[in-house]
Image (spheres, rainbow, N blue to C red):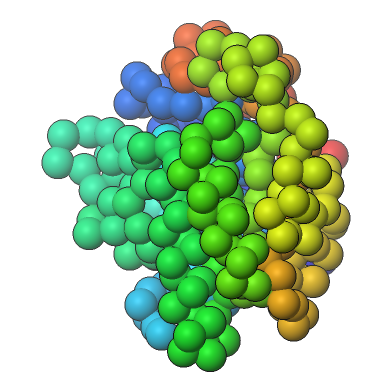
């Protein structure tokens, strides 16, 4: 039941975020769709959070380091009850709280402002260090893009997290192998990525980032006592769920036409009906 619940929520997120992007006339659908199953698994099953008390001291913390993928984040926050679903209709509109990059002063449930790539993980490491010092029980989860791992600040943060033995920290790399305009390995190669994380003192696991059952099992394991930070390299497909967007760098950002939107919704509804 957990798996089916999350899958249904992820399908709803995909349909809803595409509508947001079409209505707004801008957005980042490719990365939103690759991260959706990960974000849905966190918000609709794993995170110990309460939308009625979004700043509760004992809450788990989630940081979307790839801050341009707000379609996935905002739909998850709305679906989890942090603000009314109707607010999604204001996405990127003038005076909307739903900016292109998340802003914690505008929306409950947003832990830190992100968007400039390379900033989310360093902030999350600071949050995890604070939890370690206070012997707090909260966990810190971070979703980062793989292209973002070309930023030096990410590896400085990773090195420090390994040094501190931050067992309360879990990073999920949305490894869709595409970034704006090209493949990651053609732009600035990341492989051997597993070996690099291990060299920085992390426990490293590879996982199918669209296998909800595997994601939930991995997140369950994050609750176990650990003495090292943990990274899940989640192999994903950019544009997952929509045939013409899958594995296409051109959909890093962009807006579907009316015909494309209709096709995308039809495909997602067919998947939901299975």
In this view, the residue in front, 129 or 17, is 129
- Rendering coords of residue 271 (x, y %): 77, 34
Vertical placement of residue 44 versus 21, above or below: below
In this view, the residue in front, 238 or 268, is 238
In this view, the residue in front, 93 or 152, is 152
- Rendering coords of residue 138 (x, y %): 55, 80
- Along the horizontal axis of the image, is 188 left or right of 128? right
Q: Let me know if residue 40 appears in the view.
A: no
**Which quadrant: the N terminus?**
bottom right
- Rendering coords of residue 20 (x, y %): 41, 33
- Along the horizontal axis of the image, is 208 left or right of 74? right
**Which quadrant: the C terminus?**
top right
Q: Quadrant of residue 98?
A: top left
- Along the horizontal axis of the image, is 248 left or right of 135? right
Q: Residue at x 59, y 56 (%)?
A: 159
Q: Residue at x 61, y 20 (%)?
A: 188
Q: Residue at x 65, y 72 (%)?
A: 165
- Rendering coords of residue 56 (x, y %): 40, 83
Q: Quick one: which residue is furthest to the left in this view?
A: 95
Q: Residue at x 57, y 86 (%)?
A: 137
Q: Quadrant of residue 248?
A: top right
Vertical placement of residue 198 versus 176, above or below: below
């Amino acid at each position: 039941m957990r798996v089916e619940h999350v899958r249904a929520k992820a399908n709803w997120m995909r349909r809803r975020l595409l509508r947001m992007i079409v209505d707004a006339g801008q957005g980042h659908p490719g990365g939103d769709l690759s991260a959706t199953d990960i974000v849905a698994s966190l918000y609709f099953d794993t995170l110990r959070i309460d939308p009625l008390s979004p700043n509760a001291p004992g809450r788990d913390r989630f940081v979307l380091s790839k801050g341009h993928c707000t379609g996935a984040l905002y739909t998850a926050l709305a679906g989890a009850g942090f603000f009314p679903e109707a607010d999604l209709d204001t996405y990127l509109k003038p005076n909307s709280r739903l900016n292109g990059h998340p802003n914690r002063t505008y929306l409950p449930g947003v832990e830190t402002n992100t968007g400039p790539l390379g900033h989310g993980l360093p902030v999350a490491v600071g949050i995890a260090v604070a939890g370690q010092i206070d012997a707090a029980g909260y966990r810190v989860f971070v979703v980062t893009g793989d292209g973002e791992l070309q930023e030096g600040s990410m590896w400085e943060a990773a090195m420090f997290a390994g040094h501190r033995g931050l067992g309360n920290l879990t990073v999920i790399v949305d490894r869709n192998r595409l970034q704006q305009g090209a493949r990651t390995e053609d732009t600035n190669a990341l492989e051997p990525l597993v070996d690099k994380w291990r060299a920085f003192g992390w426990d490293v696991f590879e996982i199918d980032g669209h296998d909800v059952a595997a994601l939930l099992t991995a997140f369950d394991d994050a609750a176990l006592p650990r003495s090292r930070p943990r990274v899940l390299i989640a192999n994903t497909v950019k544009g997952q769920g929509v045939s013409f967007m899958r594995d296409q760098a051109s959909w890093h950002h962009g807006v579907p036409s009316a015909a494309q939107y209709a096709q995308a919704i039809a495909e997602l509804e067919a998947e939901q009906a299975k």
